[in-house]
């Protein structure tokens, strides 16, 4: 059975790590880094990564004519958002004095506020933190609850509907570190940089059948 | 809780690990890809490559190494050394580096930090700061930035510089105590704490680690977010796991 995985390239940083990590766990799959909406539409699975600032992400999605392709993949096939690829799914982000995002998930994106009584908790939130699983999911298979994943971000998502929340993490505040519904899974952390736990999550994604 | 990070650092010269890495049963001690793989397997939280290649002919070898490491080691990789332009940053990120360390160039052209951070996001811009204590006996502690491997004084105050670099968009600071580097007597704790307490972004302490207590002191007394060491791991004195267990015993949150 063919298993084509499209990693969406919209000019937001290094996608090689994501693609290499997927190739590592699913050597038989056909992983393509692409900015072609046709390739994305044909793929069996779609990975939507991203780093940098929300404003640039939205601008680049528009200039690469990829908002539609992301929207369609989000509605139709196994879809994995990573980091900024999670945040821009929401309605709006507070970054860059406010940015309208894709609006595929109800809710917003806020910046961490440093706390006087936790002076060593810096922003960005950078490093390995624990991910508490809040709903059973195929993508958590083989991964311990509270396993550590690698994070690097200054903003976090707040879904309006709690049913979206797949995991939470504590840093300055308890925040949503993964969301899931139907064919969509998206993480604030970087599975491609999270050693064994991250590789397992990616492997689970390459085999995930949301219909089951 | 967020774990404090333990980061082994490899000096690379023209594609080879300088001084070698003395792991048990390692096949090629000078191969940075093999060393990176070993450290990944051993539980390192990140890796740092410092490219000290002097000859411009050999400068691109680091790109091949980064590509190979990124294809098989799935933890964050920082690469520093000889970065002079946004194009240099882009090449390393495209090869698979997650963060790029800017050192001397930041001192000469601080705008480079702002430009690179605006373009690629502050999460991938690390400003490396080499500092020494310069205060005289009886004076309050003062720290100054040095460039060119600690040889050139700049007259710039290290704490003010750290605040400025974070403001310019550094997502993280790699702080090396030049007067401790290679001494094995421990981090310069005063310097580390002064910088870590002054900035909002994470600080990696570096320079002077000779034993595992030094790593703990960097976090507990120096307030560092991450600790970096080279020789104590390269020559097999301690394993990453031993270091983390010692840190945990000292009450530091670690990833085991």
Image (cartoon, helix red, strand yellow):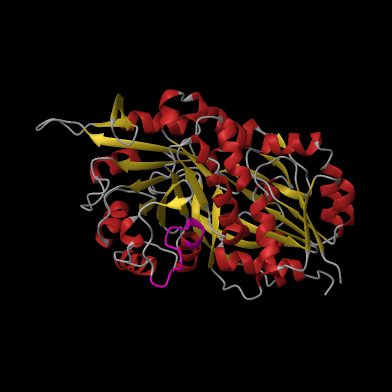
The answer to which quarter of the image holds residue A12 is: top right
Q: Is residue B46 above or below residue B249?
A: above
User: Would residue A165 be found to the left or right of residue B219 on screen?
Assistant: right
Q: Is residue B185 above or below residue A133?
A: above
Q: Position of residue B202 (x, y in %)?
A: 43, 45
Q: In the image shown, does B154 or A91 lie closer to the viewer?
A: B154
Residue occupying the point 36% across, 60% down = B234
Picture mark count: 0
User: Would residue B221 be found to the left or right of residue A184 on screen?
Assistant: left
Q: In the image shown, does A134 or A147 lie closer to the viewer?
A: A147
Residue A61 is one of the magenta-drawn residues = no
Q: Determine if residue B213 is in view.
A: yes
Q: Is residue A133 above or below residue B118?
A: below
Residue occupying the point 65% across, 70% down = A140
User: Where does the magenta region start and end?
Assistant: B24-34
Q: In the image shown, does A135 or A46 lie closer to the viewer?
A: A46
Quarter of the rendering occupied by the C terminus of chain B: bottom left
Q: In the image shown, does A212 or B27 lie closer to the viewer?
A: B27
Q: Position of residue B217 (x, y in %)?
A: 26, 55
Q: Position of residue B180 (x, y in %)?
A: 24, 45
Q: Position of residue A87 (x, y in %)?
A: 68, 47
Residue B32 is one of the magenta-drawn residues = yes
Residue occupying the point 82% across, 54% down = A74
Residue occupying the point 41% across, 63% down = B254
Q: Determine if residue A134 is in view.
A: no
Magenta portion: prevailing SS class: loop
- Outermost left residue: B138
User: Would residue B87 be found to the left or right of residue A211 on screen?
Assistant: left
């Amino acid at each position: 059975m063919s298993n084509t995985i499209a990693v969406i390239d919209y000019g937001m940083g290094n996608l090689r790590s994501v693609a290499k990590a997927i190739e590592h766990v699913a050597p038989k799959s056909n992983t393509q880094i692409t900015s072609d909406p046709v390739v994305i539409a044909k793929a069996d699975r779609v990975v939507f990564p991203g780093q940098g600032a929300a404003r640039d992400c939205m601008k680049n999605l528009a200039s690469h004519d990829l908002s539609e392709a992301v929207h369609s993949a989000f509605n139709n096939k196994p879809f994995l958002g990573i980091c900024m690829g999670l945040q821009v799914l929401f309605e709006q982000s507070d970054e860059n004095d406010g940015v309208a995002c894709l609006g595929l998930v109800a809710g917003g994106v806020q910046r961490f506020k440093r706390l006087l009584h936790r002076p060593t908790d810096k922003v960005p939130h950078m490093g390995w933190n624990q991910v508490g699983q809040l709903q059973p999911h195929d993508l958590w298979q083989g991964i311990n609850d509270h396993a550590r994943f690698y994070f690097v971000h200054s903003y976090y998502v707040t879904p309006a509907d709690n049913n979206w929340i797949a995991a939470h993490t504590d840093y300055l505040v308890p925040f949503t570190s993964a969301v899931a519904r139907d064919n969509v899974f998206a993480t604030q952390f970087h599975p491609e940089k999270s050693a064994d736990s991250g590789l397992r999550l990616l492997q689970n994604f390459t085999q995930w059948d949301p219909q089951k | 809780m967020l774990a404090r990070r333990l980061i082994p650092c490899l000096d690379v010269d023209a594609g080879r690990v300088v001084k070698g890495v003395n792991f048990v049963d390692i096949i090629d001690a000078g191969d940075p890809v093999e060393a990176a793989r070993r450290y990944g397997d051993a539980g390192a939280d990140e890796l740092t490559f410092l490219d000290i290649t002097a000859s411009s002919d050999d400068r691109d070898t680091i790109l091949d190494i980064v590509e190979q490491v990124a294809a098989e080691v799935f933890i964050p990789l920082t690469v520093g050394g000889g970065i002079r332009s946004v194009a240099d940053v882009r090449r390393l990120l495209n090869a698979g580096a997650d963060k790029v360390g800017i050192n001397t160039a930041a001192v000469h052209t601080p705008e480079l930090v702002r430009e690179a951070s605006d373009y690629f996001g502050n999460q991938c811009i690390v400003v490396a700061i080499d500092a020494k204590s310069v205060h005289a006996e009886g004076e309050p502690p003062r720290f100054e930035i040095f460039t060119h491997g600690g040889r050139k004084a700049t007259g710039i105050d290290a704490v003010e510089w750290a605040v400025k670099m974070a403001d310019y968009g550094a997502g993280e600071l790699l702080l090396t105590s030049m007067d401790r580097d290679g001494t094995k007597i421990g981090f310069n704790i005063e310097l580390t704490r002064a910088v870590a307490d002054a900035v909002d972004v994470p600080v990696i302490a570096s320079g002077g680690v000779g034993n595992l207590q030094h790593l703990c002191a960097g976090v507990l007394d120096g307030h560092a977010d991450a600790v970096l060491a080279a020789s104590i791991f390269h020559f097999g004195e301690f394993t990453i796991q031993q270091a983390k267990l010692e840190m945990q015993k000292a009450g530091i949150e670690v990833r085991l």
